[in-house]
Image (cartoon, helix red, strand yellow):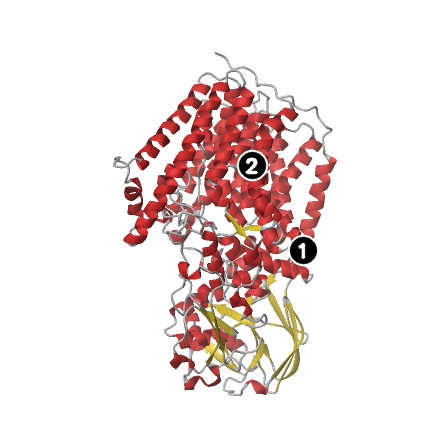
Amino acid sequence: MPERSRPRVSPTRFRLLFVAPTMLMLVVLVAPLIGGGETLYFRDVLSSHWPLKAAQGQLLAEGSMLPLVDPYRAGQPLLGNPNALVLYPTSLLLLVADPLWVLNAHIWLHVLLAPWAAFWLGRAWGLGRPAAWAVGVAYGGGGFLLSTANLFNMVAGAALTPAFVAACLGAARTQTPRQRTAAWSLAALLWALLLLAGDPTLAAAAFALGATAVVARALGSRDRGTDGERAPGSLRETLYGLALATVGGLLVAAPLIVETLRILPRSRRGYWRFDPESILTQSWHPATLLEQLTPLLFGGPLAGAWGTALHGGHEPLILSLHLGWAVLALVVVSVGHGGLAARWAWGWTALGLCFALGAHNPLVPPLLELPGASLLRYPIRLWSLPALALALLAGIGLERLLRGAPGALVRLRAVLGAGFALIALALVGLVLPGAPSARTPAWLLRPWLPTIDDELSGSLLAAEAYRWSVTWLLLALGLAALLATSLLWRRRPLVAAALLLALHFGSQLVLLGPLLDHDDAAPYRQPPGLLSALPAGPLIAHDDALGVFGTRQRPTLDPEDRDLGAVTRVRLERAPHSLGIAHGRRYAFAATPEGLDSFFTSALADALAVAPDDAGRLQMLRGSGVDLLVTSRPFDEPLLEEPSLGDQGLELVDSVQPNEPRAAVYGASPSWIYRLGGSPPPYVLARRVVPAPTMNEGVLRLAAPSFDPRSEVVLSAADARAVDGTVPGDSQSGSGDGEVLVRHETPERVELEVTSPGGGVLVASERAWLALWRARVDDTEADVLVANMHRIGVAVPAGTHRVTLWVDRRPTRVAVTASLLALATLLALAVRGRAPRRMRDST
């Protein structure tokens, strides 16, 4: 039987039948976040990204629109860190709302946007409205997109990727040069947003998708595609437009690019790079294909994520890759479609899976030898490619069903029926006593739990058996409902399609709901008891971030009380820089996970871990300007009473119990707060230089019992030679021989008056050394030295001098100027080339 034409659907009926159910379910899901009473909470959302957003909010309130350094993390980079999303448009919400709400708003806005972006992609490939909405439902309700809801720096890139591809395709289809320029200008703006969205890997993947789509369309201009329309535009015009979009987007995002390149060479990621094993840690394991049959099969945020052996021993970065049975069925229905869109989608599905395999694909490790490849991490991010491509194939499958393609309905029923039979069989085997598969959790889980004791393993097995039974029951009911919709396909295809998509999306939100689990926001907005004992002024080090003075505590779920929100609250109390920065506290060694903090600070943090004793570690902390130390265990009395330390001893300030009532259930202990005697003031004039030929020697000098950071400074041998003559090397004078007065101080500029009869090295003991800093002594430029391994130093000759330290904003101003000009130009081109309102598509 030949295919029939598409069923005609008016825009109003389309919105009521297809759009309204999907968006209503999604809005209900995120409504608690919109109201601000709830917050997403697990993983990096609160522990890493909230502190960055809180610091930006406080600096914005002080008038700093584009902060380059973060004073709440001892001067580490801020604007140049893509994970901070300082330049992303949602940051403007900080002008009217608190950082925690803005953090959540950035996520739920893009979760709401994703289906529309993918719908646009379907329309750009020529699909009718219902089929294009299937693309949006498949992508927006897929495990990959929903998993990014707990990855602040990935969710925007994941949501915008289909929009960028759609904009490129739309630009290639325009007729007049003016309209084509306007369309490519829109693509350039979306490309800029992708660059600003926080994940360069997703941005690069999106660009590859968009570029190949328009080039394939230009090369295959004889292919009439899914809509039967000949693709206009030559390859040359397409390449010109793509170049305009590329350059325009890069210029708009220039401030972020410039600042990232300024900090990258001397960051941990740029200086040391990542080793191949670290880069490939989060690779897609083929065994996780089983999760396409059962969502969160290997555990999830509320189930403990027990399948860490499949992810290099770590919790999976992407918690779920589940597409849903309806999407799998529609993809099967699409098989055999010969259009350009289908060929493009199948190609990117294969390529995406190939690259996402990472360590499990022998072709991938050699690619790490390419220039710049060692800066990338986690191949699983490239699942964005098959996630979007398979969603498009699902839309093509629905289009074939609506057109009555031969065998399409049979395939749909076959896949859904097979799924129902498989899930029903698994459910019966799990719940029937004595059935052969009644011990399924045991034989499936135990190979992946070799280090867990029998008692916990037994509790986890029981919990997983219960969770699987509930999941399989819901899946069986959902598959039965999906099969029922197939009865309507002959007589009411549009109603059947709408029901199919609504049932699929609803089941996805129920089964993958833990990915967007939220908690009461009030406990996170209130400072815990530990913060009340930590004043706002001193620089604080927390051992739960360092892990050097005892076993690093990581509260875990109790098998009988699986409250992940409580665990998260305990963790934030144990490592309070997440909460502390939001309440104005300042922290040393509060690193962010992407490796863009100062290499020197990271190196010293590593050195702390291998120092021979606690006394040496405390000396290194003093040299870093740390005033207060928080630990999870008390120090021994001999260390506290060591007479040789003099006024450089430790003073116990307080011990604080956790706020969380059930903290003991999750293994939390009290916190001990110590004051480090002998720590230098924020700005000190060191009268004696201690040279260090190597970094290892520098660590030993800094950790020596005789080192006094109030009068001495450790410099590299080269820097020590450079200041020879300015600082008397044999001087043993104390800090009283010099005077430092602060005349003006902001996070990015300090003006000091330094008086010393013999000269010395001015040490900014609470500011991280970055290549952004410049120095001037009176009217003469001076070198910015690496003092005490990772702080700022400036040689000052004898006498009274005016010393100025500032962050060089000249490259920033040039980049911002270029960005504003490019933005204005692209907006003008987009407005100037707007086509007159066309007749509404009746399909």
Say whether disc 2 or disc 1 marks the residue closer to the N-terminus.
2
Q: Do callouts 2 and 1 mark residues in contact (Cβ within 8 Å)?
A: no
Report the residue marked by disc 1.
Answer: 814
Crowding at dot 1, Cα within 10 Å, few <14 / some 14-19 / many 20+, comes out as: few
Asked whether residue 64 is in view, the answer is: no
Report the residue marked by disc 2.
Answer: 25
* In front of the other: 489 or 699: 489
Asked whether residue 666 is in view, the answer is: yes
Q: Is residue 447 left or right of residue 329?
A: left
Q: Quadrant of the C terminus?
A: top right
- Between the residue at mark 2 and the residue at mark 1, the CA separation in whole angstroms equals 46 Å
* In front of the other: 413 or 366: 413
* Amino acid residing under circle 1: Val
- Circle 1 — which element? helix
* Placement of 631 over or under 686, stated as above or below: above
* In front of the other: 308 or 617: 308
* Placement of 448 over or under 684, stated as above or below: above
Q: Is residue 545 left or right of residue 13?
A: left
